[in-house]
Amino acid sequence: MRAFILLTLPLVLAACGGSSHRDARVVSAPAQAAFATGPIYSQCRASERSASNRQLCGCIQAVADRELSGRDERRIAGFFNDPEAAHAVKISDTTANDAFWSRYRDFIGVARRTCG
């Protein structure tokens, strides 16, 4: 499972884009790539992944700002340093973790379309 998490985070790094209200998002149409700084940007830049350049990390953060709550952003940023935490959420059977994981998967998809 650790391999899955380590493969999932680079998918996010292969992505990018925009603000912070999930209700305003449009999943069907890719958004314009943008740039932002925040917790995901910081962890992305601090990572040792070769794909973690300034523009890509800024794009991913911009998508996070548009698609996720601040709480979800901080939680996802923690996955960079602790991929086991992501695994624990994924295999958890709680309604809250299932909902979070669904938002996380949606975020990855939008980031890939926007920043890729």
Image: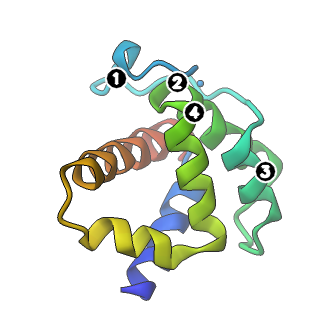
Sequence-wise, the earlier of marks 1 and 4 is 1
Q: Which residue is at 63% across, 31% downward?
A: 62
Q: Which residue is at 55% across, 67% downward?
A: 10
Cβ atoms at labels 3 and 2 below 8 Å apart: no
Residue labelled with disc 3: 42
User: Badge 1 local density, few (<14 within 10 Å), some, or many (20+)?
Assistant: few
The nearer-to-camera label among 1 and 2 is 2
Quick check: 21 above or below 50?
above
Quick check: 49 above or below 2?
above
Is 110 positioned to the left or the right of 32 in the image?
Answer: left
Q: Which residue is at 73% across, 57% downward?
A: 43
Q: CA distance from mark 3 to mark 4?
A: 14 Å
Q: Secondary structure at mark 2?
A: helix
User: Badge 3 local density, few (<14 within 10 Å), some, or many (20+)?
Assistant: some
Is 65 positioned to the left or the right of 7 in the image?
Answer: right
Residue labelled with disc 2: 66
Give the quarter of the image for residue 53.
Answer: bottom right
User: Badge 4 local density, few (<14 within 10 Å), some, or many (20+)?
Assistant: some
Q: Which residue is at 74% across, 30% downward?
A: 36
Q: Amino acid at mark 1?
A: Ala
Cβ atoms at labels 1 and 4 below 8 Å apart: no
Confirm whether residue 84 shows in the render: yes
Q: CA distance from mark 1 to mark 3?
A: 27 Å
Judge by depth and name the residue closer to the eye, 79 or 97. 97
Cβ atoms at labels 1 and 3 below 8 Å apart: no
Q: CA distance from mark 3 to mark 2?
A: 17 Å
Q: Secondary structure at mark 4?
A: helix
Which x, y percent locates residue 94?
A: 20, 58
Disc number placed over residue 70 in the picture, else none: 4
Q: CA distance from mark 2 to mark 4?
A: 10 Å
